[in-house]
Structure formats: structure tokens, C-alpha cells
Amino acid sequence: MNNETEYFLKDIMQKYFEKMSVLVSQIPQEVRTLLLPPYTLYTGFKGVLHVDQTGRLGFEILRQRASRLSVKVRNTPLRVEEEIFGALGEPTMFRIGGHDTEIHGGVFTCKDFTQKYEHELPKGQSTLNFYSCKNTSPIELGTEAECKIVDCRIFWIINDRRYVKRIHFAWLFGNKAIMTRIDPLLQSESDFYSFLFGMLYQIMTNGYEKPVDSKTQTKVLEVYSKLIERVEKEFREHLVLTKGDEFIFQQLLNKHKFFLHPAAQTIENQPILSKNVTRKPDFHVLVSQNERIYVEIEPPFCKPFEGSKQTQRLEGALKQVEEWKNILSTELDGKQTIRYLIIIGLLDDLNPDERQAMERLNKVQQDLTVVTWDSVMQTISNMKRQVTNRLGK
């Protein structure tokens, strides 16, 4: 790797963390550790970007430092999965193939370790228990994959020796081209808001992870109330732009994708399908292991109907969904529930005939729903109301 490429890759990482530090400053000091992962609070760290012989890359924070960001690029003879996890064998437990994926707060361990040292494993965290680390890899990184590993722990026994490690933050790429296409500023914003709103959903459904006094609860309520109001304002400002580009709305939802489906396990931006398609879905929402939604967005200034007739923009979106259906129905063989969502137009722009035409279309569809951008705004409004009602108690 030449010096120019090395500098470029290091610059991407540094910009990501510099932007994160600016975003974090919006959150009051007293609740930052409660709402955000530890790595987002680092003022400095020592990190390394592994580049293996297959072209895969793996960035990892090795340790926290005082106030300096240090990123070194190192060529490794090992696969990056082995550099990060300490093991790479056959078969793999699961394969990461898409973009914008994340494993957060998990515990990776193996049968050999749990038999001898189960008392050392953290309690109350999601645990992935592998049969053996000698011949099984936890993760295989596909050539088009991009994934973040956040605040995870590894408890292995490899060659009869204990291997214990904490991954504060790691970012894996299936090839160098994926990393060079990353917008570090947008990625930082997307991660920051995903973490914050993910913690909001956790608090609202399961409560706080540890005892929190009433003063802290009040401060958390204030933070989220102001944050959601800011998000709502940002959406409204963009929705009134009659000449807005679709890319603007793609970025807006990527930044605040939580509001596509607050209860989703993960929301992936522009997922990769196994076959070439005319156009990739804008989002893949993993509701549960057995249910997923593929989302196509069209700008709010594009109407779905003119009278009772479908507009060209809606026809194009329906054609894309049909293409995805043909691929996914073959791949998954009916083992999962797959639904499709098209977001297009604004309700106020539709006359009664056009609203009825959209209702008729939705009635005859079994796995597809067409909605306007008002549905996203309604989700934001609902969350704002729930924050006030439930976090304020």
C-alpha cells in the first residue's frame, strides 16, 4: 500500500471520530455514559487499520489514550477476522455480507470456555456460544461487507489457552473500495443517532440498565425531548422543499433511520442482493429473525397518483419491488416473512380520488404497502408523545 492510499484511509477514520466528538458535545456530560457507547466518548485512542492479503480491512481501537487520535496502517498475513477475533476456521458461525451492519454489546464465547469458566462471563448480555474456537470462525466477512463491532467481548480457549479480549470498537470492510466510498461525517451522524435512539427504545421497553435517580431521569427526558423536536423540525424543513433531490431524503433517513421502525433489530442502508438489480432497496429493516421489510423511498414532491392513475414514479417503484420479490422469494424459500414498503408523496397533495386510489392499491396487496411521508412524521410525533408520557414517570 502506497503512502498516499495509507494517508487517505487514516484520514477517513480520523474524520469519523472528530465528527463524533462534536456530536457528543450536544449531550450533557452527566448522562453521556448512560446513553452512549464508551468509544464515542474517547477524546483519544491508539488504533490500527489491518489490511490483509485478501483485500479486507479491519480497523480496531486498541486502547484509549489521553487526547490524541492515533491510527496506524499495518499489513497482516492473517485474515482480518482472525486479527479481530483470534480465530478463523471452518465452518463459520455466520457470514456478514451487507453494508451498514452492527453487532453491539455482544459476548462471543465457546463451549470449551463455558465448561471451565462460565462464572467469568458477563451477565445480562447477548451471548453467542460457539462449539469450538479451534475449527470454527465466529464471523466470515463477505467481499462486499461492512460492519461495526461495538463494545463486545470475546472469551475463547485456543490451543488450551484462555483468550479474553474486549472490542471497544472495530470497523470491518470486505474490500478497500467500500471504505474509500464511506462518507465519514454521515457515518458518524448515523451511528450517533442510532445509538441514542436505540438506548431510548431500550429504556422505554425494558427500563434503565442500572438504577437511575430521579434527577438523572429528568435530564434524560429533557435530552430526548429536545432531540426529537430537532429531528421533527429537520424533517419538516426538508419535506417542504418542492425541488428536493431524492438523495437528500436518502441521507436524511439514513441519519435518522430509527424512525423507519423503532422496534427493528437493525436497519441497513442500501442492502446488497445476491443478484444484479436495476436498483437496490433504499433500506432493509430486520424486524426479527423471521421478519424483514425492504423499503423504497421516493421524494415527497412526487405524487403516487394523478387522479386514479399511477404516476410514472410509483410505477417505477412497483417495478423495482417486483424485481426484489423475484430474487428474495427464491433465496428464502418461504422461511421468512418479507414485506415491502414504498414511501412517496405527501397526503396534503392528494385529492380525495387519489387517496382512494392509494387505499384500493393497498387493499389488493398482500405484502406491499404504499404510504406517504406523513407516516414517518407520525412515527416521530408518536415517539415524542411516548417520551413525555413514559420517561417522565
Image (tube, helix red, strand yellow):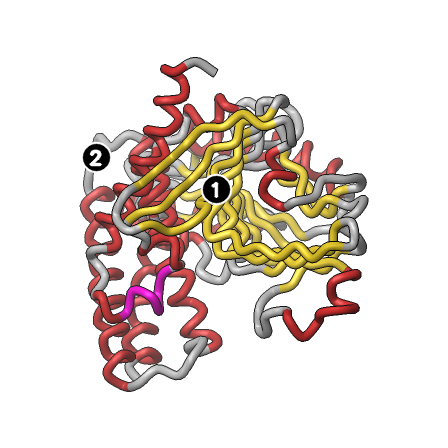
Query: Over which residues does the magenta segment extend?
Result: 31-36
The amino acid on which the numbered mark 1 sits, given as a three-letter code, is Glu
- Residue name at image x 34 percent, y 73 percent: 386
Query: Magenta includes 94?
Result: no
In which image quadrant can residue 287 be found?
A: bottom right
Residue 99: assigned label: none
Q: Is residue 366 left or right of residue 10?
A: right
- The answer to whether residue 59 is seen in the rendering is yes
- Indicate the position of residue 68 as horizontal and vertical percent values: 28, 43
Q: Which residue is mark 2?
A: 242
Is residue 52 rendered to the left or right of residue 67?
right
* Residue 26 % position (x, y): 20, 57
Whether residue 259 is visible, yes or no, is no
Return the residue nearer the eye: 348 or 340: 340
SS at mark 2 in the image: loop
x 27%, y 66%: residue: 224
Crowd rating for badge 1 (residues with CA inside 10 Å; few <14, some 14–19, many 20+): many
Residue found at x 57% / y 68%: 125
How far is mark 1 from mark 2, CA to CA?
43 Å
In-image side of 252 versus 126 (left or right): left
Q: Quadrant of the C terminus?
A: bottom left
User: What is the quadrant of residue 344 in the picture?
Assistant: top left
The correct choice, above or below, for 90 with respect to 194 in the image is above
Q: In the rendered structure, which amino acid carries the disc numbered 2?
A: Thr
**Local crowd size for mark 2, using a 10 Å CA cut-off: few (<14), some (14–19), many (≥20):** few
What residue does disc 1 label?
60
Between marks 1 and 2 in the image, the one whose residue lies nearer the viewer: 1
